[in-house]
Amino acid sequence: MNSILEIENLCKYYGKSDNQTKALDGITFNVMQGEFLGIMGSSGSGKSTLLNCIATVIGPSSGKIIMRGKEVQSLKGTQLADYRGKQIGYLFQNFELLDNLTGHENILLPLSLHNVPKSESNKRIMELASYLEITDVLDKFPSQMSGGQKQRVAAARAVILNPSIILADEPTGALDSKNAKSLMEKLLGLNQEHYATILMVTHDSNAASYCKRILFIQDGVIFHELRRNIPEESQQAFYERILKVMAQLGGGTANVL
Amino acid sequence: MFFDLVSRNSKRSRKENGLFFASLLISIVAFYNILSLSKQDVMIFLTKLESDAVNKLLTMIPLFYGMTLFILFFLIYFASKFQLERRRHEFGVYLMMGMRRSKLFFMLLAEDFRSSMLALLMGLPIAILLSELTSLLTARLVGLGIIGHQISISFQAILWTAVGFYLIKLIAFLILSGKIARQEIGSLLVETPEGTKKALPSIVYALALSVGVIFLVAAYIMAIKGLAWDGVGKMGLTLILGFTGTLLVFFGFRSIMGFLAKHSGSNKKLQAFTFRQLQENIIRRSTTLAISSLLILAGLCCFGAGVAIAQFYGGSQQHVLDYTFDGDSQDITIVKETLASHGLDSLFSELFEMRVGYIRSAEDRNNAFQMNSVMEYLAQLPESDDRNVLLNNLGYQTYPHLISQSSYNRLLSIAGKNTIELAENEAAVYMDTEFISSTKLEMLNRILSANPKVQISGENYQLTGTVQSTSLVTDRSITLSFALIVPDAEFERFTENDYDIYLNAVLDPEQIAGKSLLNAISDTNQKLDAAGLIYESYLQNMGRQLFYVVAASYITIYLAIIFLIIANTIIGVQFLTWQQKTSRRYKTLVRLGAPYETLCYSAGKQIKWYFGIPTVVAAISSVFGVRALFSGLLSSRTKSNLSTMMMISAVMMLLLCVVEYIYMVAVKKSSNRYILTLMVPEREE
């Protein structure tokens, strides 16, 4: 299997020496083609910083992010815009749909940003919409959709340009359990049937149990790694293993007064 | 600590909303300029000559001041409203932390006072400079560049500017802060709901649009046909149709925007986003936009009327004569003797008689002159308004004035024009420019070229040459609508030696050398006054014209600028506020990989449309509005002068383009700066 994304010794420090916060303190891992990788950690552990670095929303202090063999920090101008638009698809916790655009127009946004002709994607939109069960809401505005529909429209927008990797930032954070489950099933389907590579940040153990591999981050470093034994291990069993690790996070019972 | 916060807040407000601050400066400049009108060079000069009329105008200044105060109040109110709305959350936080409402109120009052003070400190020097500049410029434009300019700061104007400015700011502030203070902390802390207004069925909007267009067209037709001037009722109907038409067009405009957003052909550079943003903006603010458009229209109409009036009264009459001594009130031979005895005749390089009289030899005064052939020629011309007016006017010319050829030729040679040659039994036509437009002039000249036969006192004559129109005397209010120039012998015979003499004079160039024309004439006036002579000077006459020009054009153009500025500031501030309210969308786009340039491009396009729509509607309406004003206010000369009107319209459009361009650039810059701040991510949990 090829690795799509390589993170080498990534550091992100905030503040000056005396008062420095180490959001990321030397993180190294690879994401393989077609992988569904979860990143877990408590609030403030550096998960979002990691995702933002990969999305080039913020620049790392040191270390390398290599996407398909190209170092991301060296990208400039149109290359950078292309990277943001075509190499990565971003799924936000709060959906981040533009509330004055219809579902259809929202999904088309990445195309419009990267000057891809509309006609090419019409077929793909219809396929995606029927897979994600949002065909009915394509002409509606976000205010007329349910939370689950909004997030599935956002998912369609994230994958419309066939990105190399989907970065999902707490995608179930704003959903109820039923919608969360349905979204995770759709994401799993995208991963298994459409071979989409997904990197998901979450602290929802339930959502994480859909992943093949989970990295646990604490205080800016990788603290633990879990792999699901497919096909022997059931999702339920994997979920229980995740819970155990989560209990250990933050020093486990040692930190409990 | 408290004052530290006040100073920091007011500094931030200025930085964040430069456009608002600029509008404050503009109001100050506007106040000062109208209040210091009496100190303008032209006005000072006019007071000497036409003190009554000037004083009448100056007593109207408080009225204009009050009106400006009233209009600018709305500008300040709107701009402050946007400004305070943006800080709701901040106020909520202050209150949460235990700041008392009274303290918050005083803090805002102090901030307001501080920014007003700064605006005054910056605005007054600009206002004074601009007022001096206008003074110099108008003096130069009307040919007074000659006066020694004195810097004249009006302290009274400064005082009233400050008073007026603080007054409207305070009233606006009290109303707005009262509104905010009454709200719950919770509702302050929550971002104001975007208020997705309930959408009516789209047929309603399409209907509103078409009814609006019908109303507007009806108003245009009434305006252009002159029906609007028939009576108060019809004028009211035209205005109401125009007003509601504009409102309805803007209300219904969303259907066009929706269509554009849905069917935007290419999918380039966020087209759908751009049009949706615009659509939403127009939906939310259709009334304000309509009002802004009407303000621009009012500005354009004022400007058009002002320029037209200036053009009309300013005229393009050549300056030939400096003095005329009237023969009615004094004997011209005595005048000549007095001039000679006082040694005043040496002041003039030219001194000649202009002789004008009636056809007294005719027995029937109602038929002293007949020009049937001219009327026949006219009647054969294709039907037109101009022809009918000429037919009507010339029909009354049965007892015209006569002008002696020699005195008129003397005038022509002084003016540097070719003299006219008249053979026996030939006469030339004289008509003052005030009574004949260029198209009518052309019509008459064509007829004259055929040398039509006429009868003067029963004798056969033929008309020759072209229509003459060089002013006979200095006084521009003495004009002849129709006269005949005849050889001297015939002149004496027809008038039976009973005619009026006007003694015209031109100042010796040596008298003017080294000083301004104004000073030369003023000096000469003193000498003539001392000799007890009655006279009309070029200056008095110019003063009279100037007064009309200055009074009418200064005020209309002033109002035009105020209207334009207010409308544009409202549009601009509204756009920027809306952009800030929807900042989240821009942030999302950034995260989706939108480069800075694309966002700026989309915002720029939104700005173009947002300014463009009300401006274009106003421009279209103004074509009709200005024409209606012309047909209602001006005499036939300007009314039928199509090319002048086109010129005025072109100047207006050019001015409008320049103003809009400046505003768009300013708003774009401000918007780009804001987008740049959105490019940096912030931590959101």
Image (cartoon, coloured by chain):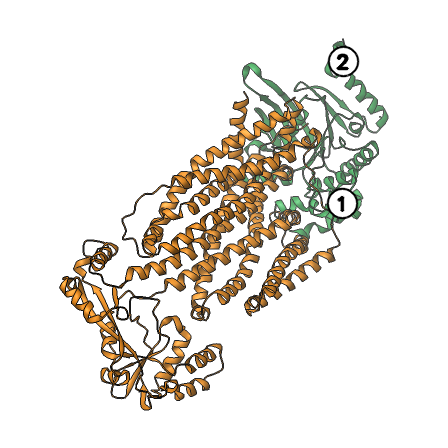
| Residue displayed at 48% across by 83% down | B382
The spot of residue A217 in percent (x, y) is 70, 21
Across and down, in percent, residue B59 comes to 44, 50
| Colour of chain A in the image | green
Q: Chain of mark 2?
A: A
- Residue at 62% x, 39% y is B586
Which amino acid lies under the numbered mark 2 shown in the image of this protein?
Gly
Q: In this orientation, which residue lies closer to the viewer: A172 or B2?
A: B2
Using a 10 Å C-alpha cutoff, classify the residue at mark 2 as few (fewer than 14 neighbours), some (14 to 19) or many (20 or more): few
Q: Do circles 2 and 1 both sit on a common chain?
A: yes
Residue B29 relative to residue B152: left or right: right
The quadrant of the rendering that contains the C terminus of chain B is top right
Indicate whether B278 appears above or below A170: below
Residue depicted at x 26% and y 66%: B320
Instruction: Say whether residue B597 is visible.
Output: no
Q: Nearer the viewer, residue A208 or A149?
A: A149
Question: Which numbered tag is attached to residue A252?
Answer: 2
Q: The N terminus of chain B lies in which quarter of the figure?
A: top right
Instruction: Please give the label number shown on residue B601.
Output: none
* Residue wearing tag 1: A128
Query: Mark 1: which secondary structure?
Result: helix
Marked residue chain, label 1 = A
Q: Which amino acid is tagged 1?
A: Leu
* For marks 2 and 1 on the same chain, the one whose residue lies earlier in the sequence: 1
x then y, percent, for residue B297? 54, 56
Which chain corresponds to the colour orange? Answer: B
SS at mark 2?
Answer: helix
Residue B469 image-quadrant placement: bottom left
